[in-house]
């Protein structure tokens, strides 16, 4: 186990973890809400450093990032554990591990090995994904710093619940981030995710101000966050607080974990959500995980010509020239276009 970063000693061998917005007070012999960080004799340790539970080469579109080096590959890694307990988690078998599960599962991999594997497999970037990169911060931080020196890009796919202290530490090495905005009501965040809404909204604004490339994802779940008023709230927040060029990805819910009794999101509900996003003025709204090429294509917000066609999370046609629309020369928002 490795001593954690970002915690304070409180006396009586208790500590406060400052890694995520839960800011757990962890007493001697106990673990925080994520179960990943444990206090042993007044020292806070991370139990997941240097051990991956998943390593895959994915299209960058699968993160999803549609405006960041489209068509490139991301070396994607995760450790077990999460600071959220979403009842609908699609990766619950690795995100909700506890106890000895952390040490018993996965494979050892040093930061050097991860960066080396990324380069050898021709990946443009490393994606810290599948579970929550905040809770494997120390590992991702060491990998990201090494990768940064070699020119490999770093990507977080996150629930956006980190503290500003953590965000400021990782920001110099972070090239892009996709944040889940899972609902627009605090009571939903508390009941379904075991967290609060406001820290996520604050971080979204901060990330945008920091100039890190940002895309937002919302999993649309029937009866949880699909009310048009709530959808409009999310779309307005993105348009006003983050900017109309921030891509918004809509994902279809499939029954999982503790929400097996909820049906998949109807396609017409996803289409209606997309319409609200476009009416609000967002320039790039996508439906990701359904079999429709049209819903994942990028169109020029000025002249409506098709810029990128995608299928199965891959690019099948990219018409962007030097970051611009080939028809009207509008500069298209993104990095590496
Ligand atoms: S990372 Fe978050 S959930 Fe885990 S111990 Fe720290 S404050 Fe608590």
Image (cartoon, rainbow, N blue to C red):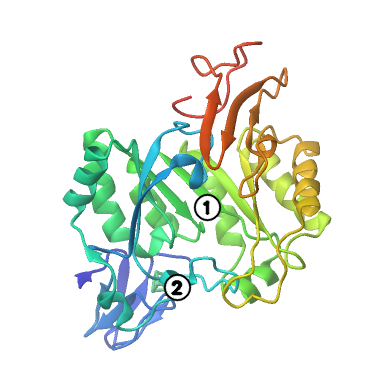
Q: Quadrant of ligand 1?
A: bottom left
Q: Residue at x 53, y 29 (%)?
A: 316
Mark 2, other Cα within 10 Å: few <14 / some 14–19 / many ≥20: few
The relative height of residue 73 versus residue 99 in the rendered view (above or below) is above
Whole-percent x, y for residue 126 in the image: 34, 45
| Picture disc at residue 135 | none
**As drawn, is 288 to the left or to the right of 127?**
right
Say which of 336 and 10 sits in front: 336
Question: Which quadrant would residue 187 be assigned to in this image?
Answer: bottom right
Question: Which quadrant would residue 124 be assigned to in this image?
Answer: top left
Mark 1, other Cα within 10 Å: few <14 / some 14–19 / many ≥20: some
Say which of 317 and 197 sits in front: 317
Say which of 209 and 77 sits in front: 77
Q: Is mark 1 within 8 Å of ligand 1?
A: no
Whole-percent x, y for residue 157 in the image: 46, 52
Task: Measure the alpha-carbon separation of dots 1 and 2.
Answer: 27 Å
Whole-percent x, y for residue 260 in the image: 64, 75
Whole-percent x, y for residue 198 in the image: 61, 61
The relative height of residue 229 versus residue 11 in the rendered view (above or below) is above
Query: Which quadrant of the figure contains the N terminus?
Result: bottom left
The residue identified by callout 2 is 93
Q: Are marks 1 and 2 in contact (CB under 8 Å)?
A: no
* Residue 132 visible, this orientation: yes
**As drawn, is 328 to the left or to the right of 44?**
right
Q: Residue at x 47, y 34 (%)?
A: 68
| Picture disc at residue 203 | 1
Say which of 106 and 153 sits in front: 106
């Amino acid at each position: 186990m490795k001593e954690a970063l970002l915690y304070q000693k409180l006396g009586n061998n208790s500590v406060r973890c400052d890694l995520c917005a839960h800011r757990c007070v962890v007493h001697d012999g106990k673990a925080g809400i994520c179960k990943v960080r444990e206090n042993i004799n007044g020292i806070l340790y991370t139990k997941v450093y240097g051990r991956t539970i998943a390593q895959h080469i994915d299209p960058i579109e699968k993160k999803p990032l549609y405006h960041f080096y489209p068509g490139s590959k991301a070396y994607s890694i995760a450790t077990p554990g999460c600071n959220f307990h979403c009842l609908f988690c699609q990766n619950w078998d690795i995100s909700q591990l506890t106890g000895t599960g952390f040490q018993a599962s996965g494979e050892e991999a040093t930061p050097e090995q991860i960066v080396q594997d990324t380069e050898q497999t021709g990946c443009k970037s490393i994606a810290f994904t599948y579970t929550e990169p905040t809770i494997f911060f120390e590992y991702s931080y060491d990998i990201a710093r090494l990768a940064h020196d070699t020119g490999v890009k770093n990507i977080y796919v996150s629930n956006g619940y980190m503290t500003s202290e953590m965000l400021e530490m990782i920001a110099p090495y972070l090239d892009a981030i996709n944040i889940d905005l899972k609902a627009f009501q605090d009571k939903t965040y508390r009941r379904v995710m075991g967290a609060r809404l406001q820290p996520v909204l604050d971080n979204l604004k901060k990330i945008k101000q920091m100039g890190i490339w940002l895309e937002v994802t919302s999993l649309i779940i029937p009866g949880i966050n699909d009310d048009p008023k709530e959808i409009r709230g999310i779309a307005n927040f993105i348009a006003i607080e983050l900017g109309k060029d921030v891509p918004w990805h809509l994902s279809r819910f499939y029954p999982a974990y503790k929400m097996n009794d909820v049906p998949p999101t109807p396609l017409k509900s996803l289409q209606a959500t997309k319409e609200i996003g476009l009416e609000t003025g967002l320039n790039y709204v996508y439906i990701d995980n359904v079999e429709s090429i049209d819903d994942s294509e990028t169109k020029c917000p000025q002249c409506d010509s098709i810029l990128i066609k995608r299928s199965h999370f891959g690019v099948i046609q990219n018409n962007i020239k030097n970051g611009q629309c080939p028809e009207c020369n509008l500069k298209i928002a993104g990095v590496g276009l």
